[in-house]
């Protein structure tokens, strides 16, 4: 497949590309002829993905294993790309994870890592790559939030709070970026069939038992919303309805429903 004029020499950096939504998003970039930098901890999986995408599409994929919870590793990643003059035109902050249980019973370091990956790394990468996008007059930032962003979530209190940050931060910068050629999109999926639920010990919750979206449909919605420069995008009618209802419902009721869904 030959690259179109619009996507020629453009590159996307996708975090959390070793699994789930991130991995699926990489397919969309590749199909549009956009080169990739794939980031996650599991190097083998990234290499398999790079090999498969390069065999199928006329693109270059750079594999960058990195623990995003580690500030020094993030700096080293940025410096490697900078040293090789790799421009990032599309930044996808997708890497993230959750944990289920009463806050005081959950592992302290894992909770802090959750804030580091879901919030700090996302902010750090955005701050590092945004100036280049602005200088070139083009950029797309896609931050994967969640329907968890719209209300507090007992038994996943840290996770919900991190996603509220992602939504608020993204809306804030999206406004600042108007007219620059760079857009920021907060994508807010509900329960989706990936490795997330198992990783968060969430498989048995009412939320995940009451229906999950396919990873393909969620990634496609995220990709198209980002390309169109939408600021907030929620896939699925049920999720849109839920996000709207919480704005008009008593906070105590909203907390109780979220608590029930997370048990
Ligand atoms: N699935 C859902 O129900 C759902 C719903 C709403 C929002 N989301 C959000 O969607 C995003 C993607 O999750 P997913 O559902 O696709 O889950 P997933 O299949 O578990 O994928 C998570 C990805 O994040 C990466 N990651 C986790 N910790 C990392 C770290 N310290 N450093 C680098 N990469 C790290 C993982 O790679 P390695 O393990 O290889 O590092 C993996 O590629 C997350 O932000 C999640 O919060 C998911």
Image (tube, helix red, strand yellow):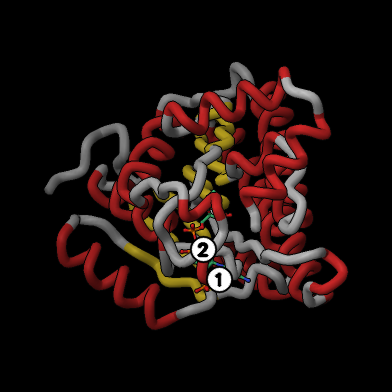
Identify the element where label 2 is drawn: helix
Image side of residue 63 versus residue 100, left or right = left
> Which residue occupies the foreground of this view, 79 or 20?
20
- Residue farthest toward the left in the current orientation of the protein: 1
Do the CB atoms of the residues marked 1 and 2 lie less than 8 Å apart? yes
Residue visible at 57% across and 51% down in the picture: 93
Residue visible at 44% across and 33% down in the picture: 235
- Residue farthest toward the bottom in the current orientation of the protein: 44
- Residue 30 in the image: state x and y as whole percent: 28, 52
Mark 2 residue's CB less than 8 Å from ligand 1:
yes
> Which residue occupies the foreground of this view, 18 or 255?
255
Circle 1 is placed at which residue position? 199
> Which residue occupies the foreground of this view, 147 or 20?
147
Q: Is residue 88 above or below residue 186?
A: below
- Residue 151 in the image: state x and y as whole percent: 73, 37
Circle 2 is placed at which residue position? 196
């Amino acid at each position: 497949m030959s690259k179109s004029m619009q996507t020629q020499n453009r590159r996307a950096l996708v975090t959390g590309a070793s699994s789930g939504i991130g991995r699926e998003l990489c397919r969309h970039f590749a199909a549009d002829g956009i080169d990739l930098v794939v980031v996650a901890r599991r190097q083998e999986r990234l290499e398999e993905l790079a090999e498969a995408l390069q065999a199928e599409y006329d693109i270059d994929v750079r594999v960058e294993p990195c623990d995003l919870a580690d500030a020094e590793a993030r700096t080293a990643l940025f410096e490697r790309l900078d040293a090789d003059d790799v421009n990032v035109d599309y930044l996808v902050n997708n890497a993230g994870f959750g944990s289920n249980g009463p806050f005081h019973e959950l592992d302290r370091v894992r909770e802090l890592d959750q804030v580091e990956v879901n919030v700090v790394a996302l902010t750090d990468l955005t701050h590092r790559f945004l100036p280049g996008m602005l200088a070139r007059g083009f950029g797309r930032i896609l931050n994967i939030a969640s329907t968890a962003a719209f209300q507090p979530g007992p038994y996943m209190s840290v996770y919900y709070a991190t996603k509220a940050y992602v939504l608020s931060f993204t809306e804030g910068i999206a406004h600042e970026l108007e007219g620059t050629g760079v857009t920021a999109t907060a994508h807010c999926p509900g329960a989706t069939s990936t490795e997330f639920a198992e990783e968060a010990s969430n498989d048995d919750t009412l939320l995940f038992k009451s229906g999950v979206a396919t990873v393909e449909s969620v990634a496609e919605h995220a990709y198209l919303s980002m390309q169109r420069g939408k600021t907030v995008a929620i896939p699925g009618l049920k999720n849109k309805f839920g996000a709207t209802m919480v704005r008009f419902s008593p906070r105590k009721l909203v907390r109780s429903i979220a608590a029930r869904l997370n048990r």
